[in-house]
Image (cartoon, helix red, strand yellow):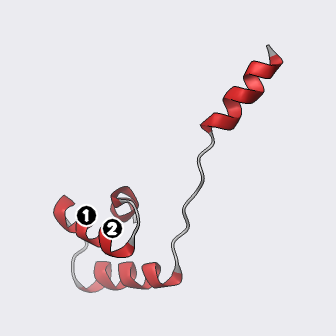
Amino acid sequence: NVNCVSLCNTNTQQQRHRTTPSQVQFLENYFTTVDDFPDSNMREKISSKLNMPSKSVHIW
């Protein structure tokens, strides 16, 4: 059914979160001067400080 397909497609899209210039600056500084591979605890701290998902910090 065409109506079902259009309704199902609208629910699967997720909004992208963009990093702010200040978040980028912090992450670049951290990864170049402090640690290239922070552990999960540090990623959680960074993500809470920057108000962004831990997964985003991990992928960065």
Q: Residue furthest top?
A: 1
Q: CA distance from mark 2 to mark 1?
A: 5 Å
Badge count: 2
Question: Neighbour class for label 2 at 10 Å: few (<14), some, many (≥20)?
Answer: some
Q: Which residue is mark 1?
A: 44
Residue 17 relative to residue 56: left or right: right
Q: Is residue 15 above or below residue 7?
A: below
Badge 2 amino acid: Ser
Q: Which residue is mark 2?
A: 47
Q: Based on the displayed image, in which of its 4 quarters is residue 26 positioned? A: bottom left
Figure quadrant of the N terminus: top right
What element does badge 1 sit on? helix
Camera-side residue of 31 and 15: 15
Residue 5 coordinates in the image, percent (x, y): 74, 23
Residue at horizontal 29 percent and vertical 81 percent from the top = 30
Residue at horizontal 61 percent and vertical 36 percent from the top = 12
Residue at horizontal 46 percent and vertical 84 percent from the top = 22
Figure quadrant of the C terminus: bottom left
Q: Based on the displayed image, in which of its 4 quarters is residue 42 positioned? A: bottom left
Camera-side residue of 55 and 8: 8
Residue 21 relative to residue 40: left or right: right
Q: Residue furthest right?
A: 2
Q: Is residue 37 visible?
A: no
Residue 13 relative to residue 24: left or right: right
Residue at horizontal 77 percent and vertical 28 percent from the top = 6
Badge 1 amino acid: Glu
Which circle marks residue 59 in the picture?
A: none
